[in-house]
Image: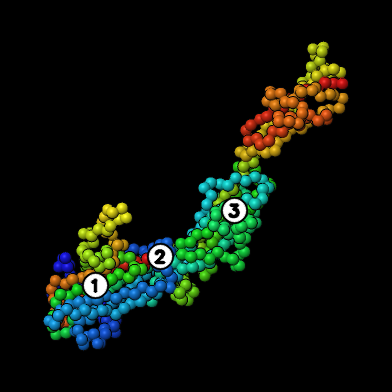
Amino acid sequence: MRNTLFLLLAALLPGQALAANHVALANDVFVERVTTDTQGKQRILLEEPKVVVPGDRLVFVLNYRNAGAQPADKFVITNPLPDAVRFADAGDTRPLVSVDGGQAWGQLDELTVAQPDGTRRPAQPADVTHLRWAFQKPIPAGATGKLMFRGVVK
Amino acid sequence: MMMKAPVGGAKHQLLPSCSLLAILVALALPSQAEAAGTRAGSTISNTASASFDTGGGTTTIDSNRVDLLVDELLDVTVASNNPADVPTTPGATAQVLSFSVTNNGNGVESFRLSTVANVGGDDYDPAVTQLYIDNGDGVFDPATDTLYIPGANDPELEPDESVTIFVIATTPGSVVDGNRGIVSLIAAAVTGTGAPGTAFPGQGEGGGDAVVGATGADGTDNGAFVVSAATVTLVKSAVVTNPLGTADPIPGATITYTIVATVAGSGSVSGLAITDNIPANTSYVASSMTLGGTPLSDAVDADAGDFNGTRINVVLGTIAGGQTRTVTFRTTID
């Protein structure tokens, strides 16, 4: 898995972006496939899909790398959620989220959604439209990291 | 607000691949198909962006874009529209059961329809004669609904679209009151059926694969008829009286006939009438007919009885099971 990811990362890094910015961001999407073996045990495989169907659980993995000589400060990664994907969770990476198309941001449990009758209800994962990770400390030169979140194909 | 994000720090290898996998496995749930969903053939694209400052002001870069084609999921459900068993009678034709067929997949799909009448768990097998595709009003009408011909006009449904199917059957003449007869309607995706996950490469809407969903791409439900029959029993009795005060049938004696019609069963009989010829060598006593103790006139008029010179006739109409009707009339011996 680790080797595979590094290979993917290397393949996906845009060379020009590296030269210009010294920071690279690679985006991979996997699908969780549940299979049952002959003993009846369920196994969950992560596959790199070309095609998906509604109900598939997707794992989005973002790899970043500061390939430059300078620390990267005020480092923020933003991922607008595709319309056809319903946010599920972000593991323990605790991103900021938006439920209004990127206008307001916060932890999911701090946000509310307007209802047709004018009242507001607590936001649910399905309301999420954007995810954002804002780093408090600069990314040192040469450092790499990985973020993930999961969603379901609507 | 953005400062609240806890991510970051000296070590930026936040989630090593191996632990990522472990978390995923722990949290994973079996995938579940939902109604319709993202249309088959559409593309899910994901791009993230990063902004940062390496000393020369804020720079923003985009990640690579990942495109995923959404395949066609084949899912269908069938549901009976009859809230209870549909009453029928022995030998009845054109008996109707109603079903809904719904495309729960995410692409347009045609469905092949079939029925099974010998499913068991019932008392008789209705003889299915035809299937009709409703014109949208939910009411069976052979003049406006479409006769279904397998393979020729398999109903084509958009995602989440439903169609009403009427199953037309004949009830065998041999059934008796209270018998149930079940018919199953089956709808199967024309593209294919099978275990969930079975793929039909290139056959999905929009050029992707067609993949069998949780329903197996076929659906079935039962509808049932219940025989609601009634039987009529007629019992006729006669009492003789004569001027001598005895019961001897001598000339001049009066015979009072009593006919009791008993209807039994859970159904009812319609068009019931009692007709009795006046026996030879006797004469009908004018205006002697009664129904339930109420006198009936001899003329053909508003009341139920008439006498035409040779027979009495009492029209009873529709009588439900469990009821009786008593008709009396008198004759004299010539």
Q: Is residue B205 above or below residue A7?
A: above
Q: Mark 1 points at which residue?
A: A78
Question: Picture quarter containing residue B280?
Answer: top right
Q: Please tell me which residue is depicted at 26% across the width and 79% down the height of the picture.
A: B62
The quadrant the C terminus of chain B occupies is top right
B282 vs B74, nearest the viewer: B282
Residue B37 numbered tag: 2
Chain assignment, label 2: B
Q: Please tell me which residue is depicted at 43% across the width and 64% down the height of the picture.
A: B36
Question: Picture quarter containing residue B87?
Answer: top right
Q: In this view, does B195 lie to the left or right of B242?
A: left
Q: Please tell me which residue is depicted at 50% across the width and 67% down the height of the picture.
A: B109
Chain assignment, label 1: A
Chain assignment, label 3: B
**What is the number of callouts on the image?**
3
* Residues beneath discs 3 and 1 located on the same chain: no
Q: Name the residue under label 3.
A: B140
